[in-house]
Amino acid sequence: MSAVLRQIWSDNDYVYAVTTSGLNVIEIESESLYAYAINTNGFTTVWANDTQIFLGTSSDGVKVMNKNCITGSIVAPHDIVSCVNNYLDDTYLTSNEIRYIHGYDDRFVCCTTSGVDVVKLEVLGYVNSTTTTDARKCFMTSGLSFYYTTVTGTEHRINRVDGYKSDWSTPDEVYRAGVGWLPDGEEIKDIFATDNTSSVDGHNTVFAATTSGAYVYDEGTNVYHVYSTN
């Protein structure tokens, strides 16, 4: 059976594609497989900063790989599974079952089957969390806020948290399908946000990919635009 693609991330040199079989490193210049790391249950999600690649698993927490460990060849791709190391498990995270990771620079937000964790990447870093079984996708901005989606029954939500230096129980803002700019019954598939791009200083713009198209929402003015797939 062919491997199923789960997510991609890229930098200037490579595309990192996680599948149900593991990780494929694609050289951008040649558009060819350069290296790979097979994992029995594959990887669920991937995000990378300038020096490290973070990989989510379905039952074994978050793994990490240093970019300088990647060696390969488009003629004979290298097996780099030995570069994959343990990083965080449920000793620190809300669960070992990782649904999604997204970060910025020295921090990332991680959606698990039991909650949402914010991880600061440093020797004396920290992990702050909230508990929920409903988190699906997450997005870390370049500023002091992050977003995550939740699905409760048939209701889809986008949640925003401002700051990430302590555990939280209630988001600072919640956008519910059926209330405001997201129509009732809309399923949120993915999210993206840009800092300080609102018409009002200090506010963000939120992009939501849904079952009917893309929604672009200005958090400062509450104005939104819809780009439909119909």
Image (cartoon, rainbow, N blue to C red):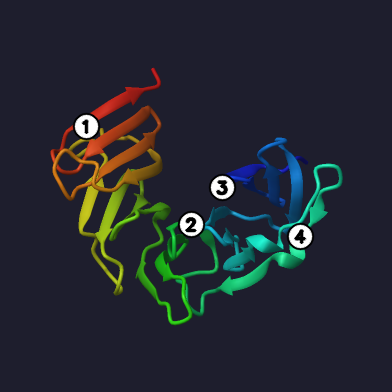
Which label number is shown at residue 11? 3
Q: Which residue is mark 2?
A: 101
Badge 1 is on which residue?
224
Image quarter of the C terminus: top left
The residue under label 3 is which amino acid type? Asp
Residue at figure coordinates x 48%, y 80% from the top left: 123
User: Which one is earlier in the sequence, the residue at label 2 or at label 3?
Assistant: 3
User: Is residue 226 depicted above or below 124 in this figure?
Assistant: above
Q: Residue 10's x, y, as percent?
A: 57, 46
Disc 2 vs disc 4: which is toward the camera? 4
For the residue pair 183 and 76, the one nearer the viewer reads as 76
- Mark sitting earlier along the chain (3/4): 3
Of the residues under marks 1 and 2, which one precedes in the sequence?
2
Local secondary structure at mark 1: strand
Q: Which residue is mark 4?
A: 80
Residue 14: % across, % down = 64, 46
Residue at mark 3 to residue at mark 4: CA–CA distance: 18 Å
Amino acid carrying label 2: it is Ile
Q: Residue at x 25, y 44 (%)?
A: 176
Q: Which amino acid does the dot numbered 1 rest on?
A: Tyr
Q: CA distance from mark 2 to mark 4?
A: 21 Å
Q: Which quarter of the image is occupied by the N terminus?
A: top right
Q: Nearer the viewer, mark 3 or mark 1?
A: 3
Q: Label 3: state its secondary structure.
A: loop
Q: Residue at x 25, y 28 (%)?
A: 225
- Look at the numbered discs 1 and 4 and tell me whether their residues touch, using CB distance below 8 Å: no
